[in-house]
């Protein structure tokens, strides 16, 4: 009996020693592998693990037979354009809306822009399969989009845009008669939704990358210019990141009409900033359209190509002086600052920068401030 126990202990010791030798061999092998190759192997393992965890297969119903459609970026140096992204809508019904002080906000005109011909080929000769699949991906895909897509379907389905071109356009899109193009369909739906919701309810629309500096209570039926012409000082491009309009305003109706009749999903900005610029250039000066174009300093005190300057702290005395003067100009002339998120989302806010001062001085959520800004 004692002999068997001793033999068993010896076998265990041999087995443990064998395991230790295997471990040493494995570690020796790993140490021989170059660090870069080892890092690559680990990265591939992590990537495979993440893919298997987060991959979702979402079945789609078979394609129905489509039916035919049923309807015929730089500011001046001192004041001074491709998924958005992200947008927010504030719809407010006002029985007695305040009146804008037009003496402080002059109308900027742009008579030089010519009319853009209606592109019927985009509307009537789309890739129907591509259009239908794009709508399905947007409206029936991941769980985090279900609430948004449900609200979109409800709005267009419950006569939210009744008697407007938006209703007809959306029906054509669902049937596959409108090509969504290469630009994100979500982006173009955002361009249309802001117009349709404002037309139905009235109120204020803002992109989520807009910081409010002052109350909008004195603003009514306004749109902001993004850039000015260097010679004429008239606006050369408008932007749709901030829109303030009454319910059923005729300019909004024209915007929606332009969207449906000239929609092009392959040109970034065609259905957004360029759209509002085209329409305003046509109706400018007509008495039935009562609206005001605000100068770039109102909402766009910096153009997208120079937004980095707003995140930088002072480099020297000259730069510090420029920052101070620009900040004072914003305090005096701006209602909000558009941050151009596509260009600025990775930029760090440096101490002493314009954005740093704005963040410290403004209560972004309650639209009031701790000082005089």
Image (cartoon, helix red, strand yellow):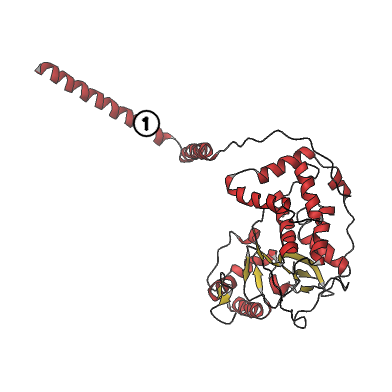
In this rendered view, identify the residue nearer to me: 338 or 123.
Answer: 123
Image quarter (top left, top right, bottom left or bottom right) of the N terminus: top left
Residue 277 is at least partly visible in this image: yes
Q: Position of residue 80 (x, y in %)?
A: 73, 71
**Figure quadrant of residue 243:** bottom right
Q: Is residue 155 above or below residue 176?
A: below
> On the picture, is 171 further left or further right than 112?
left
> On the picture, is 156 further left or further right than 331?
right
In this rendered view, identify the residue nearer to me: 57 or 171.
Answer: 171
> On the picture, is 109 further left or further right than 74?
right
Pointer 1: what residue? 26
**Figure quadrant of residue 19:** top left
Q: Is residue 317 above or below residue 267?
A: below
Image quarter (top left, top right, bottom left or bottom right) of the C terminus: bottom right
Q: Position of residue 71 (x, y in %)?
A: 86, 49
Residue 81 is at least partly visible in this image: no
Q: Residue at x 62, y 71 (%)?
A: 212
Farthest residue, direction left: 2
Number of numbered discs overlaid on the protein picture = 1
Q: Secondary structure at mark 1?
A: helix
Q: Position of residue 359 (x, y in %)?
A: 55, 71
Circle 1 residues within 10 Å: few <14, some 14–19, many ≥20:
few
Q: Position of residue 72 (x, y in %)?
A: 89, 50
**Figure quadrant of residue 93:** bottom right
Q: Residue at x 90, y 63 (%)?
A: 114
């Amino acid at each position: 009996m004692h002999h068997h126990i001793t033999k068993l202990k010896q076998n265990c010791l041999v087995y443990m020693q064998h395991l230790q030798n295997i471990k040493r061999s494995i570690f020796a092998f790993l140490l021989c592998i170059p660090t870069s190759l080892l890092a690559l192997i680990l990265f591939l393992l992590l990537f495979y693990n993440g893919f298997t965890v987060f991959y979702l297969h979402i079945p789609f119903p078979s394609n129905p037979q489509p039916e035919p459609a049923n309807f015929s970026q730089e500011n001046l140096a001192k004041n001074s354009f491709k998924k958005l992204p992200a947008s927010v809508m504030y719809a407010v019904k006002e029985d007695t809306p305040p009146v804008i002080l037009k003496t402080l906000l002059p109308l900027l005109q742009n008579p030089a822009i010519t009319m853009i011909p209606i592109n019927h080929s985009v509307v009537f000769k789309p890739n129907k399969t591509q259009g239908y699949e794009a709508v399905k991906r947007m409206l029936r895909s991941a769980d985090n989009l279900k609430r948004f897509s449900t609200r979109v379907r409800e709005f267009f389905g419950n006569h939210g845009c009744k008697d407007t071109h938006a209703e007809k356009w959306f029906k054509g899109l669902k049937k596959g008669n409108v090509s969504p193009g290469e630009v994100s369909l979500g982006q173009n739906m955002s361009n249309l939704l802001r117009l349709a919701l404002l037309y139905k309810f009235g109120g204020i629309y803002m992109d989520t990358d807009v910081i409010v500096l002052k109350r909008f209570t004195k603003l009514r039926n306004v749109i902001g210019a993004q850039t000015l012409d260097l010679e004429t000082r008239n606006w050369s491009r408008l932007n749709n990141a901030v829109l303030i309009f009454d319910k059923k305003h005729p300019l909004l109706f024209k915007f929606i009409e332009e969207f449906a009749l000239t929609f092009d999903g392959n040109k970034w900005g065609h259905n957004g900033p360029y759209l509002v610029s085209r329409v305003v250039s046509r109706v400018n000066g007509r008495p039935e359209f009562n609206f005001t174009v605000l100068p770039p300093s109102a909402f766009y005190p910096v153009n997208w190509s120079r937004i980095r300057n707003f995140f930088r702290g002072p480099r020297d005395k000259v730069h510090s002086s420029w920052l101070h003067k620009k900040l004072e100009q914003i305090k005096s002339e701006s209602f909000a600052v558009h941050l151009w998120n596509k260009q600025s989302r990775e930029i760090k806010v440096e101490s002493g920068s314009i954005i740093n001062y704005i963040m410290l001085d403004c209560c972004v959520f309650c639209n009031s401030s701790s000082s005089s800004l």
